[in-house]
Amino acid sequence: MAAACSFRSVARAPPPLRGLARRGVVHCCSTAPPSGGTSTSSSKLVLEVKERLEREHPGLPTGRNGRDDEEMILWFLKDRKLSVDETVSKLTKAIKWRQDFQVSELSEESVKGLYQTGKAYVHDSFDIYGRPVLVVVASKHFPSKQDPVENEKLCAFLVEKALSRLPLGTENILGIFDLRGFQVENGDLQFLKFLIDVFYYYYPKRLGQVLFVDAPFVFQPMWQLVKPLLKQYASLESSKPSRLS
């Protein structure tokens, strides 16, 4: 893909994706993954959540990513610090969204129009921590010309694709926003709000880190609007900019 070629000198394996800019300033947002392992008490909580979902929301789908998916239940339990009530609430919202958004039916063919623009893609390489890398090329995003629903579908498809590539023992992905060439017409606060909701409500703690590469001056007003949104969620905390070598 043409968009990936511009990163060839720094995105290679091994070692994979040590950085996308030699002298670029990067804003970094990190999340800590839930601790691994399944204790006896956790297993009991998984069963409790599973029974409550069956009792209170029998209409929710079952199977993979459904109300009886114990792996998914455990992940949300850890995200909600083992609170059964909060897990049931958040998991119900996530499963309903997946059902309404028809996430399981998304494919490269169904998002072909926007996918071929190269505005976003899952990189062929992993980062230095073995995480799949989701890249967004902001200069190719034109909210006034592109269907917002199709943009959201592309986002969901690529998140699913990145997560499907998780190596054993790896729990989250790296997100990179390439802001080189960003202009005012590329700004899209509504999509950024959707993106934040996606990673807070539907894929909690699956986004391990975010890098904003070479943010131009015109991006600063957008960043000032985004920061308060990030602060609303305890699992998405911004840190000071760091400089890549």
Image (spheres, rainbow, N blue to C red):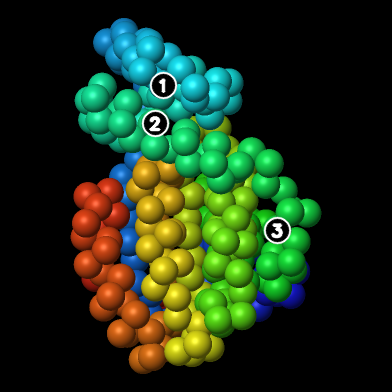
State how far apart marks 1 and 3 are (Cα): 31 Å
Q: Earlier in the sequence, mark 1 or mark 3?
A: 1
Q: Judge whether 130 appears above or below 19 on screen.
A: above
Residue 57 disc label: 1
Q: Nearer the viewer, residue 185 or 126?
A: 185
Q: In the figure, 184 relative to 124: above or below?
A: below
User: Could you classify mark 2 by the number of other residues whose Cα lies within 10 Å: few (under 14), some (14-19), or many (20 or more)?
Assistant: some
Q: Are marks 1 and 2 in contact (CB under 8 Å)?
A: yes
Q: Residues within 10 Å of mark 3 (few under 14, many from 20)?
A: some
Label number found at residue 92: 2
Provide the secondary structure element on which disc 2 rests. Answer: helix
User: Is residue 151 rendered to the left or right of residue 83?
Assistant: right
Per the image, label 3 sits on a secondary structure element best described as: loop
Q: CA distance from mark 3 to mark 2?
A: 26 Å
Q: Residue at x 31, y 31 (%)?
A: 89
Disc 1 secondary structure class:
loop
The residue located at (32%, 11%) in the rendering is 48
Residue bearing mark 3: 111
Residue 40 lies left or right of residue 96; in this view the side is: left
CA distance separating discs 1 and 2: 8 Å
Q: Amino acid under label 1?
A: His
The kind of residue tagged 2 is Thr
Q: Position of residue 95 (x, y in %)?
A: 47, 33
Instruction: Name the image quarter holding residue 23.
Output: bottom left
Of badges 3 and 2, nearer the viewer stands 2
Quarter of the figure with residue 52: top left
Front one among 39 and 157: 157
Of badges 1 and 2, the one in the foreground is 1
Where residue 185 appears, as percent x and y from the top left, is 50, 87
